Amino acid sequence: MTRTRIIGFVGSDKAEIILYLSKILTKLDKRVLIQDLSETKALSYCVNSSSQELEDIITYYQADFTNINELQTMIYDFILVDFGFNLKHPDIKKCNEIWILTDPQIHHVMALKDLKLEKEQKRILIIKDYVHGKITPKYIMKELEEVSIASDPYKIYWDQEDWKQAVNCQYNNMAFFDKLSLEYLDLFAEQLEESGITKKQLKKVFKRVGRGK
């Protein structure tokens, strides 16, 4: 039986990344659970803008979704958990890996300094809405030195179209996207390769999902 890959997400705005990833995975016939354990419930707004409190698991574009405040133990290929800035949530320790997200704003970077992970937990840093300026990836990595992020960070440059798609996720309750920046596609391709998903498979899915299928 394939081991469930549990990916935790911490930090600032990341709802659209989780939804894009879940849709790609379900198009590849993967069983996916999305869990919103964040303080803002941003993912919950994307799923149902009129009701953010769920007492059960619902279906969202072929993925299961819940904001029940404990990590589910059902059998899935992938579990995607948004912890927001709940950096001391006990279920963080249950994740195989943590995707750490921030933008260049200093208060978002500093809020991540209290993150404590187990040595064996894989971690990657994603800098969203990046623009060239005084706050460089090197500076952010230095501030998060104690989090022990070994790999170079992913940079996703600020892009008006990406921003529009992220907002549409919340207001339209849809995970469709097109004209997505190549940085997103590179991120997904590199991180999903270790689950045996090839770039050729991903390119086909990116085209289908980008057209809203």
Image: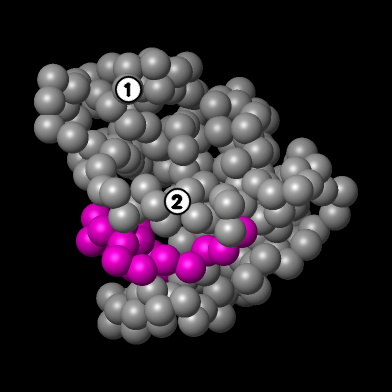
Distance Cα–Cα, label 2 vs label 1: 18 Å
Which residue: 54% across, 27% down? 85
Quadrant in which the N terminus is drawn:
bottom right
Above or below residue 85? Residue 120 is below
Mark sitting earlier along the chain (2/1): 1
Q: Which secondary structure, mark 2? A: helix
Which of discs 2 and 1 lies nearer the camera? The answer is 2
Residue that label 1 marks: 105
- Horizontal side of 74 relative to 26 (left or right) equals right
Span of residues in magenta: 173-197
Q: Where is residue 63 in the image (x, y as percent from the top left)?
A: 65, 67
Q: In which quarter of the image is residue 209?
A: bottom left
Whether residue 181 appears in this view of the structure is yes
Q: Position of residue 138 (x, y in %)?
A: 16, 26
Q: Which secondary structure, mark 1? A: loop
Whether residue 4 appears in this view of the structure is no
On whether residue 175 falls in the magenta region, the answer is yes
Please state which amino acid type lies under the numbered disc 1: Gln
Please state which amino acid type lies under the numbered disc 2: Ala
Which residue: 50% across, 35% down? 10
